[in-house]
Structures are given as structure tokens and as C-alpha cells.
Image (tube, grey):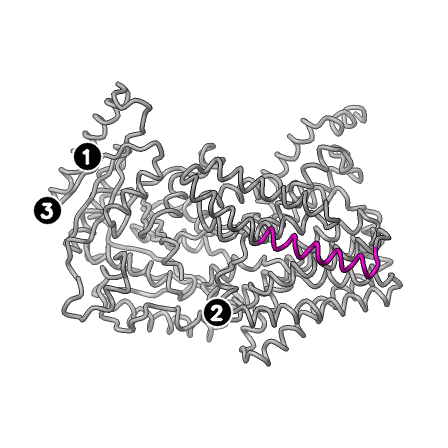
């Protein structure tokens, strides 16, 4: 048995297979236990490492390579996902809070290290480990719709300063530890680092924009360009005696504006978050010495408690200063505190560099692991608790015109501002410009989709645009292409008949394109579509899991709202609509408006469902119900019945599924969330969709609508 385990640990192919199995299975299991998925990966490293089954060897070259790539990717994604636009808007306050939330923990950590007999250099490094933070709570504030709140924006912007400063301190500490430190060497090092940073941040940005402009839609080449930039920046950082994670983080910031929210960015992050970053966390578990870890928790408990206390206290003190200076409310201040607590990306990467260089001991490394576990659990929980008590910036909450008589169709038009600025008499209520583009590909779902599109277009006196994508071939006279076009004509003929039944004008289009997503989104843009209606595709198919499905890509590329539908009965038979509402945000109001648009075509009733956790007080629930009622009355002005129902339970998905049993259709808002490390968090929408037994509409908006 031992020989088999030894052979398995020495076989790179076996090790890689085990890693894939771990990455696939453990994170979802731990998320069901309400623990971060990365905890499951650390647990796997402990169990499969030298302290456990011995199936994985952290000292093997293959494991070191995968872990290094994962560490580089982790810091790259951390830089890539920072919203530079929001940072620029509040750069002064972001810089002010960034300095406070960096220097105060740095001092606290340095003092803590000195109290426990650590050298000055190691103590400063300890302080820098506390000074940075990872935005694990970003998906939560994004879901709550408070990202535009100034306090949240300032905290997100401060991440840029804290991470860069912490990595700079790491570079200096490692240089001192290596015996290469002197005043002249420090000056030279800082100058080299400054020149290097300028080249990466500005040179890569310009080169990337030019390369993307010249290559157009060549996503494969653009993907390879981004990868080259990341690893070239990391290798170059090592040449000038700076840790590679510094180069990776700067590369993420450099290409931030280049890739934006393009499909290339999705693919780059997907590869890293799916494979390489999890490998890094497994490697962290392999390096964890269990006897030493237990010893740290027991015999060196004071060190652990002092480090934890220093982090919580210093971050709170920094937030208190920001609250006084910028006059934030306590809920805003506590949200800032919770967002700045988690220590994952930069902290773990820097700690690993320090322990491998021999600058910090294994016991300190174990303390950092405890720090990561505690803060990665406490941070998101606190963010969820305090984030729901703050409001989005009032300027961004609803449309710029407070006139509640704005027609619903105005909300769906491409140029909202132009529509709202017109005099009331000139606003378009029943305009032929309203176009519903509906791709038809599946004969089994085509009729219901076209019916739904026709009902909506009929309500707006608009136009249905049935669209069939014919996959392009090299030669336009290819017999296979002729067959595909012939099938497309048959589908469009069926769509025309359905549209005629509802008395709606239709404009069928066949588009020859080598990419279905591009064909749909570009046609919608060319036709100035007001709404894109699509049928359901199984997101759990192997191809969809590996490369992303058509729905995902359409949501990210479309210029107009997208409604993806799984209709189990004819739309004219749908009379009870359920719309789950988590928070009162611009996105949720527009989701209600979409549900209203369909409901008015069919005189259906709408139930707005809010599920609050059991810790919510009756007063909080009553206040939310009152605010939602006011928002519906002022922003929607429904001509149909809209009921509000509030439940108190912890299982949100289960509550939606139970309530859906009494309804014909559920309208869910499409959201996509990631942690800064790229690991997925549980998605209530995904759970609900897989278990609902009625018709479902997944409603999403273009990037420009997500204000």
C-alpha cells in the first residue's frame, strides 16, 4: 500500500488527476456548509499531503509549477477586478482611507511582532501582512446594489493602494533579509521598481489597447497576449529582485482598461479561477505542518490572539478615522470595516514568499492561515449584515428624471436619456421603434418564444424580429450551408405565422455567421432591438461548463435587456407571476418593470417576494415592505395588481421554490458573482432554476444598465 502511495505521489499525471478531482468536488461541498470554497481546498492539501495520505508532494516540480502559476494568477485577477473607474471618481478619499487602513495595521502588526521576540525586519513584514485586504465581500455588496455607495467605492479603491504598498514592503523586507540591503541599494531598488511599475502600468496599457484594436475579434490571440503580459511582468519582476506577485498584480491593473468586461476577460479569469488558483490553495494546505499548526494554536495561542486582535482593532481604527473625516454613517463605516477585514490574496502570497525565504517562521505562517480562515468567514458575514442597512447613492438609484409617468417602453429603449428629456407629449408610448429580437433554433420551444415576443411587441405596438443564425462555411456555395439556410427559412416561416395570429408585424432575418453569439448580439444591435428574447439551454452540459454557454455570452455582449425563457405552457395561459426581490435597487426595479410589461399584456397578477433571514427583526421587515411598496407606487405605477409578500427564513432558494408552486411563472434577475480569488460563491438563482417546476424567465441587463 505504501509503495502504491509513493508511486502515486511521484507520478505527475496521477497528482494532476487528483487535483482536478479535488477542485471539482470539494469547494461546492464546503460552500453548502456555508464555508468558503478555498477552505475546502486547504483541507484537501492537508489530507492529501505529507501529514495525511501522502498522495501529493508539495516539493515536486510539477506541484511547484502549478502553485506558482496559481499564485501569479491570483494576484493578476486581484488587480484585474479592481474597478478603476470607481477609483478615479473618489481617488482622493480612496487614497486617504488606503493610507489609514495600511499604516495603522502595519504599525499594529510590527508592534505585535516585536512583543513576541521577532526581528524588526520580520515584524515589519508581519505588519504588511495585516495591511492589505482582499475584497471577498465585493460580490455581496454587488448583489445588495450598494456598490455605488461612496463608502463602498472608497473601500474598493483603497485596495489598490494597500496591495501595492504591502507588496512593496515585502520586496524591501526580502531584500534586507537576503543581505543585499543598504541605503544606496534601497534607492536603486526603489528607482528600478518605479521605472518597472511605470513601464508595466502605462506601457502595457497602451500596447494592449493598440493590439486589441488591430486584432479586432481574434479572441484567441488576445487571450495569449494577456497571458504573455502576465508572465512576462512576473519574470521581469524577479530580474529586478522583486517578488513575481508584484509583477502579476501590476499586470492586472495594466490590462484592466484593455480587456474591460469583454469575453477575453471572462476567458482569462475562467482559466485561472477554475484550475490554477485552486492549485495554489491546495499547495498552501500541503505546506501546512499539522503538528506545528496544532502547537501554534495551543502553545502559541497568545501570538494568534494578538495578531487577530491587532487586525480587527487596527482596521476598525482606520475606518473610524474615515468616518470622522468623510462623515459616513455607522452602517457605512461598519461595511467598510467588514470589506477590509478578509486576508486572502496578497496576504497568503506574501506569507508564502516570506516563509520560503526563511524570513518568517512556520509558526507565524500557521498564524496567517488562522487569520485567513477567520477573516474569510467573518468578513463576508459582517458585510452581508451591515451592507443591507446602507443605501445606494441617491444620484444613481433611479432614472435621472423623477417623473413617475415615464412609459415602460422608455425604460427599454437604447437611448433612455433622450427619451426622458422629451416633453411628455412627445414621449413614445406605442412606437414602431420597439423591436423584440427572438432567435429561433429549437422547434420545440420556438412557438412559445415567438408568442411571448408577439405579446410584448403587441403591447408596445412594436415589431417582432425572428432571427435564425446559419453557421458560416468556408465556401458560400457549400451544400451544407444551403441545407442550413433552408431549415432557417422553415423556422422563420413558422415564426411569421405565429406573429400573424397575434396581429403583430414581423421582420424575419437570416444571418450567416461563424459565431452564434456574435450573430445574435450584432443583429440585435443593428436592428436597434429594445429586448432580446431567447430560449433556454442547459448550462450543465460539459461544453457549457468548459467554455461558457451561449446565454452567458449573450448576457455579457448584448446592448439591450435579455430575457431567457423556459416556458412550460403557452404565455397566454400565464396569469400568476412571482418576482423574488432581495433588495430595492435600480436593477430590481427594472426587473419588476419587465414583469409588469408582460403582465399587462395578459392581465396577470404579480407577487413580489422578499425572503429575509431569521435574524431580521419585525421592524426591519416592516420597513422593507413599506419601502418596497413606496418604490412600486412611485417608480412603477402599475395598472395591474402587484402584491408584496415577505417571508422570514434562511433558505432563500427553498422559499422561492415553495412559493412558486402557486404561480405560473417566476421572473429571476440574472447576476454573476465572483470573489477576488475567482472562486464561485453559492448562487440562489442557480439553485432555484434547477428545482422550479413552472415557467422561468431569467432577466438580465447590458453592462451600461448596471448602475
| Picture coordinates of residue 483, whole percent (x, y) | 24, 22
Query: Where does the magenta region start and end?
Result: 181-201
Q: Secondary structure at mark 3?
A: loop
Left or right of 488, for residue 376: right
Q: Secondary structure at mark 2?
A: loop
Alpha carbon distance from label 2 to label 3 = 46 Å
Residue behind mark 2: 149
Q: Are marks 2 and 3 in contact (CB under 8 Å)?
A: no
User: For the residues carrying marks 2 and 3, which lies nearer the camera in this image?
Assistant: 2
Task: Indicate whether 130 appears above or below 271.
Answer: below
Left or right of 340, for residue 139: left
Q: Callout 3: few (<14), some (14-19), or many (20+) C-alpha neighbours within 10 Å? A: few
| Picture coordinates of residue 544, whole percent (x, y) | 45, 36
| Picture coordinates of residue 286, whole percent (x, y) | 75, 41
Task: Indicate whether 289 appears above or below 609.
Answer: above
Q: Nearer the viewer, residue 454 or 645?
A: 454
Residue at 23 percent of width and 41 percent of height: 448
Quadrant of the drawing holding the C terminus: bottom left
Q: Earlier in the sequence, mark 2 or mark 3?
A: 2
Residue behind mark 3: 503
Residue behind mark 1: 492
Amino acid at each position: 500500500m505504501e509503495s502504491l502511495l509513493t508511486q502515486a505521489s511521484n507520478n505527475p499525471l496521477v497528482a494532476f488527476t487528483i487535483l482536478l478531482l479535488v477542485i471539482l468536488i470539494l469547494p461546492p461541498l464546503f460552500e453548502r456548509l456555508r464555508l468558503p470554497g478555498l477552505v475546502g481546498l486547504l483541507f484537501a492539501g492537508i489530507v492529501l499531503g505529507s501529514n495525511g495520505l501522502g498522495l501529493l508532494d508539495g516539493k515536486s516540480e510539477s506541484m511547484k509549477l502549478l502553485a506558482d502559476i496559481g499564485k501569479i494568477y491570483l494576484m493578476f485577477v486581484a488587480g484585474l477586478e479592481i474597478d478603476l473607474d470607481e477609483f478615479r471618481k473618489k481617488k482622493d478619499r480612496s487614497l486617504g482611507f488606503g493610507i489609514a487602513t495600511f499604516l495603522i495595521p502595519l504599525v499594529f502588526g510590527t508592534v505585535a511582532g516585536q512583543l513576541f521576540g521577532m526581528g524588526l525586519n520580520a515584524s515589519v513584514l508581519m505588519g504588511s501582512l495585516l495591511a492589505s485586504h482582499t475584497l471577498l465581500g465585493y460580490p455581496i455588496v454587488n448583489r445588495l446594489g450598494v456598490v455605488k455607495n461612496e463608502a463602498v467605492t472608497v473601500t474598493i479603491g483603497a485596495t489598490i493602494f494597500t496591495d501595492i504598498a504591502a507588496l512593496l514592503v515585502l520586496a524591501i523586507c526580502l531584500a534586507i533579509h537576503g543581505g543585499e540591503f543598504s541605503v544606496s541599494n534601497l534607492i536603486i531598488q526603489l528607482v528600478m521598481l518605479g521605472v518597472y511599475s511605470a513601464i508595466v502600468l502605462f506601457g502595457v496599457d497602451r500596447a494592449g489597447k493598440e493590439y486589441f484594436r488591430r486584432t479586432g475579434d481574434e479572441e484567441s490571440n488576445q487571450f495569449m497576449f494577456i497571458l504573455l503580459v502576465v508572465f512576462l511582468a512576473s519574470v521581469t519582476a524577479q530580474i529586478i529582485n522583486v517578488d513575481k506577485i508584484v509583477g502579476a498584480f501590476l499586470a492586472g491593473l495594466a490590462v484592466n482598461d484593455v480587456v474591460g468586461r469583454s469575453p477575453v476577460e471572462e476567458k482569462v479569469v475562467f482559466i485561472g479561477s477554475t484550475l490554477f488558483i485552486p492549485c495554489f490553495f491546495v499547495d498552501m494546505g500541503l505546506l501546512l505542518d499539522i503538528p506545528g499548526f496544532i502547537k501554534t494554536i495551543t502553545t502559541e495561542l497568545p501570538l494568534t490572539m494578538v495578531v487577530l486582535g491587532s487586525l480587527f482593532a487596527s482596521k476598525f481604527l482606520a475606518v473610524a478615522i474615515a468616518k470622522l473625516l468623510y462623515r459616513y454613517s455607522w452602517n457605512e463605516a461598519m461595511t467598510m470595516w467588514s470589506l477590509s477585514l478578509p486576508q486572502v490574496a496578497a496576504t497568503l502570497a506574501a506569507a508564502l514568499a516570506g516563509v520560503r525565504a526563511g524570513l518568517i517562521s512556520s509558526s507565524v505562517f500557521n498564524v496567517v492561515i488562522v487569520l485567513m480562515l477567520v477573516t474569510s468567514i467573518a468578513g463576508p458575514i459582517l458585510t452581508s449584515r451591515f451592507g443591507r442597512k446602507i443605501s445606494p447613492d441617491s444620484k444613481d438609484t433611479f432614472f435621472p428624471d423623477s417623473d413617475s409617468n415615464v412609459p415602460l417602453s422608455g425604460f427599454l429603449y437604447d437611448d433612455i436619456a433622450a427619451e426622458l428629456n422629451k416633453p411628455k407629449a412627445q414621449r413614445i408610448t406605442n412606437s414602431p421603434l420597439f423591436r423584440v429580437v427572438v432567435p429561433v433554433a429549437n422547434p420545440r420551444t420556438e412557438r412559445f418564444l415567438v408568442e411571448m415576443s408577439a405579446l410584448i411587441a403587441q403591447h408596445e405596438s412594436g415589431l417582432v424580429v425572428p432571427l435564425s443564425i446559419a453557421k458560416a462555411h468556408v465556401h458560400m456555395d457549400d451544400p451544407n450551408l444551403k441545407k442550413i439556410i433552408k431549415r432557417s427559412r422553415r423556422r422563420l416561416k413558422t415564426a411569421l405565422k405565429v406573429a400573424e395570429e397575434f396581429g403583430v408585424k414581423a421582420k424575419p432575418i437570416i444571418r450567416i455567421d461563424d459565431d452564434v453569439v456574435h450573430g445574435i448580439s450584432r443583429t440585435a444591435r443593428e436592428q436597434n432591438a429594445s429586448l432580446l428574447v431567447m430560449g433556454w439551454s442547459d448550462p450543465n452540459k460539459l461544453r457549457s461548463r468548459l467554455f461558457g454557454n451561449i446565454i452567458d455570452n449573450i448576457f455579457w455582449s448584448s446592448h439591450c435587456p435579455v430575457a431567457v425563457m423556459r416556458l412550460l405552457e403557452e404565455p397566454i395561459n400565464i396569469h400568476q407571476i412571482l418576482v423574488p426581490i432581495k433588495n430595492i435597487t435600480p436593477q430590481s426595479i427594472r426587473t419588476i418593470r419587465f414583469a409588469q410589461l408582460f403582465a399587462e399584456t395578459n392581465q396577470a397578477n404579480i407577487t413580489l417576494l422578499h425572503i429575509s433571514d431569521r435574524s431580521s427583526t419585525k421592524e426591519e421587515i416592516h420597513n422593507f415592505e413599506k419601502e418596497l411598496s413606496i418604490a412600486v407606487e412611485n417608480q412603477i405605477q402599475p395598472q395591474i395588481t402587484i402584491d408584496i409578500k415577505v417571508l422570514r427564513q434562511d433558505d432563500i432558494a427553498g422559499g422561492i421554490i415553495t412559493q412558486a408552486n402557486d404561480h405560473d411563472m417566476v421572473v429571476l434577475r440574472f447576476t454573476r458573482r465572483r470573489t477576488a480569488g475567482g472562486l464561485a460563491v453559492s448562487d440562489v438563482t442557480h439553485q432555484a432554476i434547477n428545482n422550479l417546476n413552472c415557467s422561468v424567465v431569467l432577466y438580465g441587463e447590458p453592462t451600461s444598465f448596471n448602475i
